Structures are given as C-alpha cells and as structure tokens.
C-alpha cells in the first residue's frame, strides 16, 4: 500500500463525509478478495465518494479524458484509476483490469459507460460481465439513491453479490455476456424499485 494513497484517504474522509452526508446500507455484502463493484453513475463525484467511504484499496475504470495531463494522470493513478477509452477500449485497459482481479483486488466499474442524470439507465455495458466471466470474480452492485449533491442527505445501497457458477464452463461469447449483463441490470433495477416502494410506504 503506498503512503500517498492512504494519506489521500485520511485527509478527504471527514470533509467528504460532511459535504456529502450519505448513509451506507449493506456493508456486509462487500467481499474480501477479488470482486467487481458496479454502480449507477449520476455525477463526477460518484468515484470520489466510493474512494472515500470505504477503507480498502480499490481500482477504478476512469475515462481517459480525466487523465489527459501529467498531474491528473499521476494523481488519479495513485488513487487506483485505470484509464479507459469509452469509445474503443484498448488492450492495456483490459490487461490492467484483469490483473487487478487476478491479484485478488477490487475493481470498480460504472457499467452504464457514462454519467446518467436520471438514476440507473437500462443501457448497460458488457465490460463488467466480461471481466467477471474471465476471472470468476463476484459482482457487487451499488446504488446511489439520489444524485450526489453538496450537503444533501443521500443513501448508498450495497446489494448482495452476484456469483459466477464456477461448476459450469463460461466463456465470453455474446450470449453469455448478454445474460450476465441482463442479470446485473435486473439486480440494479430491483434495488431501485425496492427503495422506491419503501419510500412510498412512509
């Protein structure tokens, strides 16, 4: 673990928790060892909040535009970011992501492929499914109930892990990717629906 990484964690924790007051539900669903965290993506603050909220080192897929100069590239690399071209994912991104999982670490992906202003979109990408099938990594869904905004109370819900059946041979064929992506999508939408129902009963 590098010193700078933990220094950033420590100095950002209290300010971020004050600026973005968030109740986290389902921490017991986080997994030790390799896992893929997938979340809905509503603002640029999402990865910063996940980085700050959890006292473990995670790696994040981040759009390459955020790492376009030497300073931001250095800083975000120390945070654990892996640059990704959202239009055409290159081999180095895939290799770096697979290495994270093969080293029994956590990879954070926003499978929608970009920010969505209105909660979780059904337009889910296959990246998380591909990495999961190649490494048998469990998928842990996360759902921000509201778009993160300064000084507005929010909730971050962590769902139960989706496990890959290791007794059945898997490949990254289009059919397998689609099936797993649909399962991730359904899980996220179910989390959203469950919260909506709970809110309406109050």
Image (cartoon, grey):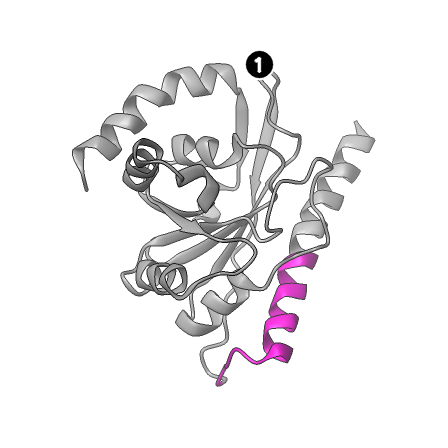
87 vs 2: above or below? below
42 vs 58: above or below? above
* Residue 166: image location, x then y, percent: 45, 78
Q: Residue at x 60, y 77 (%)?
A: 176
Q: Residue at x 62, y 64 (%)?
A: 181
Q: Residue furthest front?
A: 69
* Residue 5: image location, x then y, percent: 25, 34
Q: Residue at x 28, y 24 (%)?
A: 10
Q: Residue furthest right?
A: 200
Left or right of 154 in this view: 189? right
**Is residue 175 part of the magenta span, yes or no?**
yes
Quadrant location, the N terminus:
top left
Q: Residue at x 52, y 30 (%)?
A: 45
**Is residue 75 part of the magenta span, yes or no?**
no
Segment tinted magenta in the rendering: 169-186
106 vs 18: above or below? below
Classify residue 126 by image quadrant.
bottom right
* Residue 177: image location, x then y, percent: 59, 72
Quadrant location, the C terminus:
top right
* Residue 198: image location, x then y, percent: 75, 36
Q: Which residue is mark 1?
A: 151
Closest to the observer, 108 or 93: 93
What is the secondary structure assignment of the residue under circle 1?
loop
SS majority, magenta: helix
Q: How many marks?
A: 1
Q: Residue furthest bottom?
A: 169
> Is there any visible trace of residue 123 in the rendered image?
yes
> Is there any visible trace of residue 63 in the rendered image?
no
């Amino acid at each position: 673990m590098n010193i700078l990484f933990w220094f950033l964690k420590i100095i950002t924790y209290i300010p971020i928790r004050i600026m973005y007051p968030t109740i986290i539900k389902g921490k017991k669903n986080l997994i030790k060892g390799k896992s893929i965290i997938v979340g809905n993506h509503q603002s640029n603050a999402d990865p910063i909040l996940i980085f700050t909220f959890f006292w473990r080192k995670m790696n994040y897929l981040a759009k390459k535009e955020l790492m376009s100069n030497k300073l931001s590239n250095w800083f975000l690399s120390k945070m654990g970011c892996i640059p990704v071209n959202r239009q055409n994912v290159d081999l180095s991104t895939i290799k770096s992501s697979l290495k994270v999982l093969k080293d029994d670490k956590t990879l954070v992906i926003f499978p929608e492929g970009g920010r969505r202003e209105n909660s979780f979109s059904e337009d889910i990408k296959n990246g998380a499914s591909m990495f999961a099938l190649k490494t048998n990594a469990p998928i842990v869904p996360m759902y921000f109930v509201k778009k993160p905004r300064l000084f507005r109370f929010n909730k971050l819900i962590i769902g139960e892990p989706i496990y890959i059946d290791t007794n059945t041979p898997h490949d990254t064929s289009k059919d397998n990717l689609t099936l797993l992506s649909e399962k991730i999508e359904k899980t996220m939408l179910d989390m959203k629906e469950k919260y909506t129902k709970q809110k309406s009963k109050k």
